Image (tube, coloured by chain):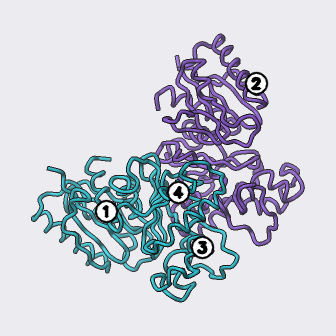
Chain colours: A cyan, B purple
Amino acid sequence: MNPLYGAVEAGGTKFVCAVGTGPDDLRDEVRFPTTTPEETLKQALDYFRQAQKKHGKLTALGIGSFGPVDLDLRSPTWGSITATPKPHWADTPVAPLFRKEFHVPVGFDTDVNGAVLGEHRWGAGQGLDTLIYLTVGTGIGGGVMAGGSLVHGIVHPEAGHILLPRDPADSFKGSCPFHDNCFEGLAAGPSLEKRWGKKGSELGPDHPAWDLEAHYLALGLQSFLCVLSPQRIILGGGVMDQPQLFPLIRKKLLALNNGYIRHPSLTASGVDAYVVPPGLGNRAGILGALALAEAAGKGL
Amino acid sequence: MNPLYGAVEAGGTKFVCAVGTGPDDLRDEVRFPTTTPEETLKQALDYFRQAQKKHGKLTALGIGSFGPVDLDLRSPTWGSITATPKPHWADTPVAPLFRKEFHVPVGFDTDVNGAVLGEHRWGAGQGLDTLIYLTVGTGIGGGVMAGGSLVHGIVHPEAGHILLPRDPADSFKGSCPFHDNCFEGLAAGPSLEKRWGKKGSELGPDHPAWDLEAHYLALGLQSFLCVLSPQRIILGGGVMDQPQLFPLIRKKLLALNNGYIRHPSLTASGVDAYVVPPGLGNRAGILGALALAEAAGKGL
């Protein structure tokens, strides 16, 4: 029998919890809104207590969390959400709570690092070792795998905050309170809405918003390409539900590279397999958390 | 007795060859100009033939090369310089030549990946695992280590070609034939010279060139910080011989981050140890090649 894992996709808006062994055996998924840590974490703990009664003992747990988070295994605050502006959640020890309750290994990482691990394990990153998973939604976040390992460094990647050249025709100032002209401030969902006065989902597929959006996304991808040389770039999140974006982004990325980095992935025939949606679709987050559990269970 | 390694710093302007066991035992360094592959590689091979007679059999060789290079161990052209614009050198199989001649393991990587490995082994990156080594000279190149391994991905990082927001007061168009507004085109040595009409080494330390140069360097570093979350950023190359640049870059990087990523390294008291010159000084290149040899000799 396969080991049974618990998974928590700890988002700023909602929590998703599930138990299972992999993408074809994800059981009992529950969702509830993210309110206060007391209420929300109690709901999650209660869920896994009940799930264990029903499905048996968990081998390990995985948590992909909104951030910033403390991933330093030697830190006294490992496993916490740290300096988030989200009310009530700053300095909340999440992973230690689950470890204390269930006495199992707990894998803890950013939601996007979880997603890139899940895509590597079961999705669009299988067989590769250097990948970026970018979510474009309420914010922009990047999960990074290099040489088969998730990148942490001093904190963890904050790929949405690279600074980009603003399009000369774009007078929108950006919506990031920390940075003028950062990727997230120019291209996340709220910026799209503020710039055009309508939610992205209400703009038609031919609206000029998408060409500008694809331009900024391609600029961001060009930076990731140059710094990390990823073998594949996976784009998820609510904004990427607009299917017209993918061909635009691919074309603009090739134009920005302008033949400089030469590789079959950076050609008109190769780029469709290079810049791709998540292989796990909208389950990339929860399956990413499951992959974190699996890795923790194996002592990775 | 320690194993003896051979090291080749294969630069676009000059080759440096040496044998030794580490930074305190680097013997017989020779330098010669990079002319044609036939002439230059023959000189390098001859050097090691003679060096073996004098110092004994080499255990392994390491080559840190100008690029782009093929680092894919499964590729039939592994160990070659590939699509370089440098006359005569495109598609030159460098590493296989040394492997065939000396029958030892040959470590082959970009010059900057070699440098980051050398800094990790003996210099400013000791004890860390996620680092970037940036050289700012005739071009801008970045070597990247993540989780203790050198980053390759589809090709290798080309960190000098991220696109940056141009300073509104800067009318210089950039000098990269491939990209408007790329880091290298705005901030490498030749751009400095074209923008100000004098070589960097001829501009006084109070010249306004340095403030703008530091601005672009900080913009580049901000992107590396967000994508890779490095534990330290090491800046080498001829342009960085201007010591007034370091304090300017550090101050501007903190201003660009604007308190967003919170870490002791990103504070006024921590940044001096975060953005640093190479611990190996101007020997970072050749010692990097030696570190590549050591890693190859150990089968890493």
* Mark 1 vs 3, N-terminal side: 1
Residue B250 placed where, x, y %?
66, 59
Observer-side mark, 4 or 2, equals 4
Residue at the front extreme of this rendering? A269
Q: CA gap, disc 4 to disc 2?
A: 39 Å
Q: CA gap, disc 1 to disc 4?
A: 32 Å
Residue type beneath disc 4: Val
- Disc ID at residue B212: none
Q: Label 2: which residue?
A: B39
Do badges 3 and 2 share one subunit?
no
Residue type beneath disc 3: His
Q: Label 3: which residue?
A: A179
Residue type beneath disc 2: Glu
Q: Label 1: which residue?
A: A63
Chain under callout 1: A
- Disc ID at residue A271: 4
Q: Is residue B191 left or right of residue B103?
A: right
Q: CA gap, disc 2 to disc 1?
A: 58 Å
Q: Is residue B50 left or right of residue A203?
A: right
* Mark 1 vs 4, N-terminal side: 1
Residue type beneath disc 1: Ile
